[in-house]
Image (spheres, coloured by chain):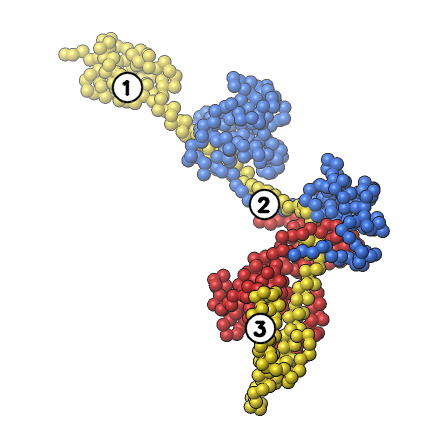
Chain colours: A yellow, B red, C blue
Amino acid sequence: RNHKIDLHRISILALADQYIAFIERAQKVSLELAADYLVMAAWLTYLKSRLLIPQAPKEGDTEPLDMAQRLAFRLQRLQAMRDAAEKLMNGPQLGRDVFERGAPEPLVIETQKEYGDTLLDLLKAYAERRQRKMVHQTYTVKKQATWSIKEARETLQRLLGAMDEWGTFDHWLEKYISAPETRRSVRASSFTASLELAREGVIELRQDEAFQPIFLRRRAVA
Amino acid sequence: MQTQPQPLMDDVMDEPENQSASITLHPQMDRDQHLRIIEAMLFAATEPVSPAKLLELLPVGTDVQSLLDDLAANYQNRGVNLVQIAGNYMLRTSPDVAFVLRRETIQQKKLTKAGLETLSIVAYHQPVTRAEIEDIRGVAISKGTLDILLDMGWVRMRGRRKTPGRPVTYGTTDAFLRHFGLNEITDLPGLHELKAAGLLEGNLPPGFDMPLPQMSDALTEDEDPLDGTEMQPPLEMHVVEEGGTEE
Amino acid sequence: MQTQPQPLMDDVMDEPENQSASITLHPQMDRDQHLRIIEAMLFAATEPVSPAKLLELLPVGTDVQSLLDDLAANYQNRGVNLVQIAGNYMLRTSPDVAFVLRRETIQQKKLTKAGLETLSIVAYHQPVTRAEIEDIRGVAISKGTLDILLDMGWVRMRGRRKTPGRPVTYGTTDAFLRHFGLNEITDLPGLHELKAAGLLEGNLPPGFDMPLPQMSDALTEDEDPLDGTEMQPPLEMHVVEEGGTEE
């Protein structure tokens, strides 16, 4: 293809022979060269055929000579790309000729936590917790400190056998009022229970004067 | 949430007590300090750094470009140079000392002659379709040839040509530019000469004005965006490349 | 196939035609070129480089140390410095511009209810032991709750209570005061102020005590100093907090 070829003087027969012979040899020689050669030979054959076969004027948009130019152009264009590839590859390449920083220092992302809690949040949490805890505590204490009326009534009934003589609540319930935290409850509940028992006629109550001690004893069975 | 860079250089600052999140409070940081900041950033970076990114580290309104120009001049005759890649900046060793540092890479050995031709055709003719690559090469290219280039990250699918069959168009990537040390595709060796010689044209009549290859992400007028089906075997028919041309 | 390294620096070399693989053939390479080589090598190295390694790249007999000294001086006031680590050399970001490598992000957080309660109890009752906090809260606190407060720097270990088991006593820190805008811990509102603010109900059970918070760095009479073993897992048994109290 480096030779200038006068298409008019090419023997189509010779070309075809060469072409076929070349294909036969092609397996043995550089196949890449073969590819190029075949492309070119095919073009030449095509061009020759265009010359030999009369053309209807103005029909085709490409004259054979124009086609020849195109062939030359194509070959030149491909060669340009091959040269360009070589130039590119021979130029400095990253990782071969030039190098980036071998030990780049990574960006450190520091996540800073910012707490949005306000003083009010803090105080609310404290007050709520303390209050909840106190309610909880008070309830527990009451449960231990309270004597129910039922409890008082049962206790008084259990003590009836010993209540022959008049005695004050504190006297009869001495062992229940020793604990200061339950004393008030014991007195209050046993007083209420005693009223019930008196109404039922089980015990008798006596108070000499207002705000004086109240005495109680078992009612004598008539 | 990204916040403003925190000043952490009390020894440099005049008023550490009043320091705030914003660097703009320290106009007295002089040009040298700005140069040191962008130098440090460029040294530490693993990727090319954009001027905008550098500006984030500097007081508002700093002329980053003039700093970069200064730094580039400073490094011009050094073992390390400041280069521009796809508009971003990075430091890399100078080609002057390549003969000392030169290392063979596996990548070099992977590209066949067909691969090399295809790569240069994609680079110089982009956006280009597979059929156009084959037209320029004069032979079909195997599926594998383009796949290797795509895998290497040097070639990407750009879009689809607005022609019957809507063939995929190919172009080069930023990684390609980075590998060959090009800022933009017009920096390709010999590109202007090839264009002047009309060798970047298709089957066009000589003298027809042909745009330079372009690699901007913007599609050209005759390209459509990719439609997401590209990863499936394309509908184009692929002629298996003649074994002999791949070596 | 990769060929021999090609000369890519014709402008630098005097005799590119005759260059060979051996550097010793280029005695005319001047000091600047040597500096360029070690600069590039140090830049591209993944680890600190020994002077012996650098010498391999240079003509036999080159005074590597003097080159390194020159390079170090060159980089002294720059954004990157040449530093020596265990006899080897590397380029590293200058500490005063190291902030360029840091990005701070702020994550808005709130303490859990358990955390807030614990913090408030520490604030009002300090010095207070873990067992006392649990007693005041009425529920156990998880290990993590106190740890978070310690980590945040709002709570500190003050000392050890002079009681059996010598439990650690906790108190608040200056950072705590700063965050909550308190000048001193005694600025915390007292019982009447909390009532006035409607945070505590009017009729509190008898026996509701609210200590006047005190915080001095001096240990109280019933505290001993910390003994340095506090960072080990404490011997106190930690009851897992009731699920419902953490929300």
| C-beta proximity under 8 Å, tags 1 and 2 | no
Badge number at residue A84? none
C173 over C40 or under it: above or below: above
Horizontal and vertical percent position of residue B119: 62, 63
Label 3, on which residue? A21
Residue drawn at the location 70% of the way across and 45% of the way down: C45
Between B213 and C116, the one nearer to me in the picture: B213
Alpha-carbon distance for marks 3 and 1?
130 Å
Q: Which residue is mark 1?
A: A152
| CB within 8 Å, label 2 to label 3 | no
Element type at marker 2? strand
| Label 2, label 3: how far apart the Cα atoms are | 78 Å
Report the number of numbered marks: 3
Residue under mark 3: which chain is it in? A
Which mark, by number, is residue C106? Answer: 2
Q: CA distance from mark 1 to mark 2?
A: 65 Å
